[in-house]
Image: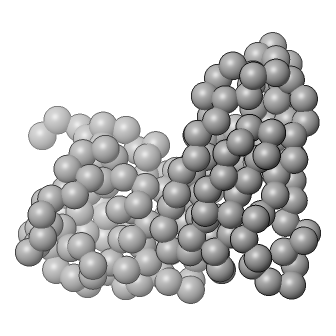
Amino acid sequence: MDGAREINEVHVPVGRPVKLIMGSEDVIHSFFIPSFRVKADVVPGRYNSLWFTATQPGRYHIFCTQYCGTKHSGMIGWVTAMTPADYQTWLSGGSSGGTMAEAGAKLFTDLACITCHVENGQGRGPVLKGMYGKQVLLTGLPATTFDDAYIRESILNPHAKVVSGFQPIMPTFQGLVTEEQLLQLIAYVKSLGENPAK
């Protein structure tokens, strides 16, 4: 979550399982690494995950195997698998742009989310601190897990699952935030840590 950001590149350490959580901003794509024999569809409006483990250092092609429009042939990239020592050296180069969670914190403030999601529990929206991974009680629906998919849905379609005890007053941010901004907001909410004892 606090690693370097890349475009059309993924650097990974050899011998360590890697999980990609993928989403599309526009149409269906398909993420394919032929050398690793892994492929998964990437669908708008939801997250899909893919696991792989690189077994030896090298550069491996990434392709989109779902015809997705006129720029389909340009949807290529590389996985660079590195020894753990080389990976740590590369990673220590870091990103000067700050972490995803830091960008999400700024966006959370800029979008005025802090006016309703107040840490003391006195806001018009539920407290988010310490909620990631826990069960959420909903109005008129079974409880659900507070995970990436739930946060995404709550931002884009907030009336789909309303937390018990709260009114459905949150506005939708569909079309107002990009996929990258959604990921930043999710990273920020995940970074909030534990709820203080009451």
Q: Could you tell me which quadrant the C terminus lies in?
A: top left
Q: Residue at x 24, y 45 (%)?
A: 134
Q: Residue at x 87, y 78 (%)?
A: 71
Q: Residue 105, can we see it?
A: no
Q: Residue 52, can we see it?
A: yes
Pick the front one: 154 or 67: 67
Pick the front one: 129 or 57: 57
Q: Residue at x 72, y 71 (%)?
A: 66
The residue most toward the top is 85
Tell me how the rendering is colored: one colour
Left or right: 85, with 173 as reference point: right
Residue 193, how many percent across, how many down? 37, 38
Tell me if residue 152 comes above or below residue 49 in the rendering. below
Total marks in image: 0
Residue 117, how many percent across, how many down? 31, 64
Left or right: 81, with 2 as reference point: right
Q: Residue at x 26, y 53 (%)?
A: 145
Tell me if residue 122 comes above or below residue 119 in the rendering. below
Tell me if residue 194 comes above or below residue 21 in the rendering. above
Find residue 192 and report its image quarter: top left
Find residue 36 and report its image quarter: top right
Residue 84, how many percent across, how many down? 76, 16
Left or right: 63, with 26 as reference point: right
Residue 91, how many percent across, how many down? 78, 29
Q: Could you tell me which quadrant the N terminus lies in?
A: top right
